[in-house]
């Protein structure tokens, strides 16, 4: 892995979860801005742990724009595990995540949520590019990821995720930005 000012570059064989994240993100970027947050970020950076889902934030949008995304996902071979197009929009507006998986399976799945809160909006606005092989995805900036896992989530799994990111980033961590995020939380 190589960390640069513009993002990270990952040179390793892609896992099935990586391929899922890349394929799904490719569809999303045709329609809207997005950012991948939480556990998959540490997995992407080499942490050995299992995850059945990937968490994605998208901007708050109108139902027509959401319907276009939903229909494109269905056309591309995905289905929503918990609602039809109208119901999924209602869930998103009510701050309830919706999940999409490849047709015929439940795992892995992408958990999508509107970036409605302050920290979610910051994550969306400050995402970084992770180049994986010949593809790329947008992930949470790593200082925000660390701060959120250490100060808000605090589960043993989240603390270990944050610790892993700290170890991998080493001197590339922007300590001032990390302190600012921790104060904000």
Image: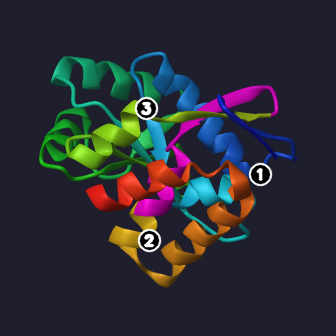
Distance between mark 3 and mark 1 Cα atoms? 21 Å
Percent coordinates x, y for residue 58 in the rendering? 34, 34
- Magenta-colored span: 133-147
Mark 2 Cα-neighbour bin, 10 Å: few <14, some 14–19, many ≥20 = many
Question: What residue sits right under mark 2 in the picture?
Answer: 150
Residue drawn 46% across and 48% down?
177
Percent coordinates x, y for residue 98 in the rendering? 31, 48
Residue drawn 56% across and 48% down?
174
Residue 23, above or below 42: above
Residue 175, above or below 50: above
- Whether residue 54 can be seen here: no
Question: What residue sits right under mark 1 in the picture?
Answer: 15
Q: Is residue 146 magenta?
A: yes
Question: Which circle, 3 or 2, is nearer the viewer?
Answer: 2
Q: In the rendered view, how is the structure colored?
A: rainbow
Question: What residue sits right under mark 3 in the picture?
Answer: 34
The mark nearer the N terminus, 3 or 1, is 1
Percent coordinates x, y for residue 129 in the rendering? 61, 32
């Amino acid at each position: 892995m190589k960390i640069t000012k513009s993002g990270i570059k990952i040179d390793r064989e892609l896992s099935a979860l990586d391929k899922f994240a890349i394929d799904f993100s490719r569809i999303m970027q045709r329609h809207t801005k997005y950012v991948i947050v939480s556990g998959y970020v540490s997995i992407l950076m080499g942490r050995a742990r299992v995850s059945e889902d990937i968490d994605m934030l998208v901007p708050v949008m109108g139902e027509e724009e959401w319907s276009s995304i939903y229909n494109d996902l269905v056309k591309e071979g995905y289905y929503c595990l918990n609602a039809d197009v109208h119901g999924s929009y209602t869930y998103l507006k009510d701050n309830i995540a919706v999940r999409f998986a490849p047709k015929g399976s439940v795992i892995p799945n992408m958990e999508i949520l509107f970036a409605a809160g302050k920290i979610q909006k910051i994550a969306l606005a400050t995402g970084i590019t992770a180049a994986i092989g010949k593809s790329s995805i947008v992930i949470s900036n790593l200082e925000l990821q660390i701060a959120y896992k250490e100060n808000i989530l605090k589960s043993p799994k989240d603390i270990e995720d944050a610790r892993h990111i700290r170890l991998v980033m080493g001197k590339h961590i922007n300590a001032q930005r990390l302190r600012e995020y921790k104060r904000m939380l």
